[in-house]
Image (cartoon, helix red, strand yellow):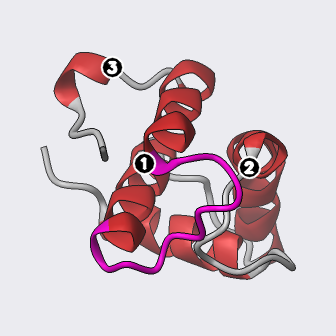
């Protein structure tokens, strides 16, 4: 199932809203994005958080890794995706993981 365009916007915008580089993910960053930042960003523009925003964040990790833009001094892409799956309620069997 394709992502809703607003979900991709929320994932990218909320990650860019943070102080670290867009390609950097550690355990704290992933948790804050899932549980605070995406919702806060949506509230700042008076819109609802799309239901598939967590899935969009999963895909953002994959895109950054594929493009060579993932910062490898935090979590590995696979570990970031694993934390997203666990914390965001994503179904791991339906997701493409990054090696």
Q: Secondary structure at mark 2?
A: loop
Q: Is residue 73 left or right of residue 94?
A: right
Residue sticking out furthest to the left: 1
The stretch in magenta equals: 66-77
**Closer to the observer: label 2 or label 3?**
2
Give the mark nearest the N terminus, 2 or 1. Answer: 2
> Which residue is identified by label 3?
91
The front one of 99 and 86 is 99
- Residue sitting at 40 percent across and 44 percent down? 55
- Residue sitting at 70 percent across and 57 percent down? 38
72 relative to 16, above or below: above
Mark 2 to mark 1 CA distance (whole Å): 14 Å
The front one of 15 and 66 is 66
* Circle 3 Cα neighbour tier, 10 Å, few/some/many (<14 / 14–19 / ≥20): few
Residue 48 x, y percent position in the rendering: 61, 56
Q: Secondary structure at mark 1?
A: helix
Mark 2 to mark 3 CA distance (whole Å): 21 Å
Task: Please identify the quarter of the rendering in which residue 52 is found.
Answer: top left
Residue 81 x, y percent position in the rendering: 47, 39
- Residue sitting at 68 percent across and 43 percent down? 34
> Which residue is identified by label 2?
26
Q: Is residue 64 left or right of residue 17?
A: left
């Amino acid at each position: 199932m394709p992502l809703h365009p607003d979900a991709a916007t929320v994932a990218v915008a909320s990650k860019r809203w943070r102080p670290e580089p867009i390609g950097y993910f550690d355990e704290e960053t992933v948790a804050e994005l899932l549980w605070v930042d995406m919702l806060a960003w949506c509230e700042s523009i008076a819109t609802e958080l799309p239901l598939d925003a967590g899935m969009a964040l999963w895909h953002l990790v994959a895109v950054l890794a594929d493009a060579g833009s993932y910062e490898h001094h935090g979590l590995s892409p696979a570990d970031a995706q694993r934390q997203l799956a666990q914390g965001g309620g994503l179904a791991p069997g339906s997701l493409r993981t990054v090696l």
